[in-house]
């Protein structure tokens, strides 16, 4: 069977574009880290990563804040592109703080290693 002559829907184009952007970013970061390891020692790269951890945590919190700020606009945009009714739009608007809460919880537990710090405080230092 030959390929379909139908144009690619807009949603697929967005998904494909964002997926390709994510792939390019991952490849770029990987290439930069590989180059850094090749030019310097692994210990130095590990120290550099430890130095930028607070910055990356701040960037993640900034992105979560921007999502909370622009959530109504994103919902309105999605409703326009999908021809959603007012009930669906109200449902997604109601989910705003639940999603933000989950993202903040994940950031605290995984990004800030809150669970590891808590367990280390309970068990004491590991020998």
Image: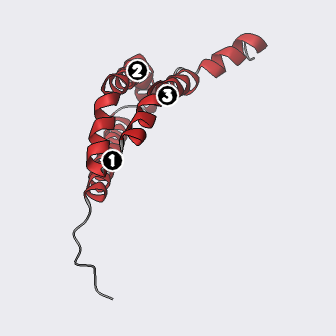
* Image coordinates for residue 66, horizontal then vertical, percent: 32, 24
Vertical placement of residue 21 versus 51, above or below: below
| Res. 27 mark | 1
* Image coordinates for residue 12, horizontal then vertical, percent: 31, 58
Q: Residues within 10 Å of mark 1 (few under 14, many from 20)?
A: few
Secondary structure type for disc 3: helix
Vertical placement of residue 103 versus 28, above or below: above
| Res. 61 mark | 2
Name the front one of labels 1 and 2. Answer: 2
| Res. 57 mark | none
Q: CA distance from mark 1 to mark 3?
A: 25 Å
Secondary structure type for disc 2: helix
At x 34% / y 47%, what residue is drawn? 84
* Closest to the observer, 56 or 97: 97
Quadrant in which residue 85 is drawn: top left
Q: Sequence-wise, which precedes: disc 1 or disc 3?
A: 1
Q: Residues within 10 Å of mark 3 (few under 14, many from 20)?
A: some
Q: Residues within 10 Å of mark 2 (few under 14, many from 20)?
A: some
Left or right: 7 in relation to 96: left
* Closest to the observer, 54 or 88: 88
* Image coordinates for residue 13, horizontal then vertical, percent: 26, 57
Name the front one of labels 3 and 2. Answer: 3
Vertical placement of residue 123 versus 82, above or below: above
Q: Sequence-wise, which precedes: disc 1 or disc 2?
A: 1
Quadrant in which residue 28 is drawn: top left
Left or right: 45 in relation to 103: left
């Amino acid at each position: 069977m030959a390929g379909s002559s139908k144009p690619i829907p807009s949603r697929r184009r967005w998904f494909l574009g964002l997926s390709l952007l994510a792939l390019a970013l991952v490849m770029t970061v990987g290439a930069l880290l590989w180059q850094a390891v090749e030019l310097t020692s692994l210990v130095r790269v590990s120290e550099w990563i430890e130095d930028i951890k607070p910055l990356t945590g701040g960037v993640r919190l900034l992105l979560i804040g921007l999502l909370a700020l622009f959530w109504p606009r994103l919902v309105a945009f999605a409703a326009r592109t999908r021809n959603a009714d007012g009930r669906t739009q109200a449902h997604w608007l109601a989910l705003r703080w639940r999603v933000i809460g989950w993202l903040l919880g994940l950031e605290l537990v995984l990004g800030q290693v809150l669970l590891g710090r808590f367990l280390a405080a309970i068990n004491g230092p590991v020998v």
